[in-house]
Image (tube, rainbow, N blue to C red):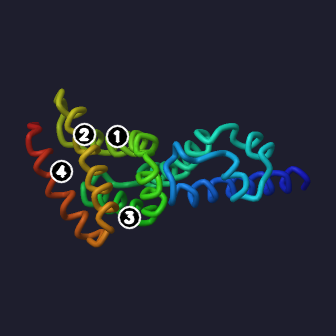
Amino acid sequence: MKNMLTESIRQKTDEQIIDATLTLLQSQSYDQLAVTEITRKAGVSRMAFYRHFGTKEAVIKAIVVQLTQDFETEAASLPLDTNEISRAFFGFVKANGIAIAVLLNAGLREQFYPPLRDILHGLYAELLQSKVSFNRSIDYVSDFTASGMLALAIRWIATGAHESIDQMVEIANEMTTAQHANIQP
């Protein structure tokens, strides 16, 4: 019982620190962010901050892990279909648009971009390998497709995400169909 209570308190403190960090990053860059501000906004001591995270970099890593784990879990059960991959990805982006926009505006693109690219790259590589027995360019096309999907998502967020998920899926499918057409069986 005591262990569960301790874990609950720890999780609450983690959430307070993460929420405070995201809130502060809405109005300043990552470089401007200070641990003192985070602790004040979170209502925790500096000691608690250092015990839970150690550095502000570790807080950002925790945010990125939370974001990417959700998508990675969903991606693991997706059928190998460009429509399904696109729909799941843009649904994820829409659901997490505020957090992603905050990270982008704070200059932290390189923290969340690679893990999401890797997930998408894996999905597209598996999709292409299921259609083609062997082709050296699969890895390149998969990486290019994943990077393109992320570029679409970043632009979508930056322009206010006015298009629907269905419209984004259509745009993404036009893009991926053109890229994948060059791989011959």
Q: Where is 51 relative to 168, above or below?
A: above
* Left or right of 88 on screen, residue 51: right
The residue sitting at 41% across, 52% down in the picture is: 104
- Binning the other alpha carbons within 10 Å of mark 1 as few (below 14), some (14 to 19) or many (20 upward) gives some
Q: Residue furthest right?
A: 2
Q: Earlier in the sequence, mark 3 or mark 1?
A: 3
Q: Residue 33, position in %: x, y?
A: 58, 47
Q: Tell me the kind of residue under disc 4.
A: Thr
Marks 3/2: CA distance? 20 Å
Q: Are marks 4 and 3 in contact (CB under 8 Å)?
A: no
- Binning the other alpha carbons within 10 Å of mark 4 as few (below 14), some (14 to 19) or many (20 upward) gives many
Q: Which mark is residue 142?
A: 2
Marks 4/3: CA distance? 17 Å
Between 124 and 54, which is closer to the camera in this rendering?
Answer: 54
Q: Residue 58, position in %: x, y?
A: 61, 40
Q: Which residue is mark 3?
A: 91
Q: Are marks 3 and 2 in contact (CB under 8 Å)?
A: no
Between 70 and 126, which is closer to the camera in this rendering?
Answer: 70
Q: Which residue is mark 4?
A: 176
Between 52 and 139, which is closer to the camera in this rendering?
Answer: 52
Give the quarter of the figure containing the C terminus: top left
Q: Where is 9 relative to 112, above or below?
A: below
Q: Tell me the kind of residue under disc 3.
A: Gly
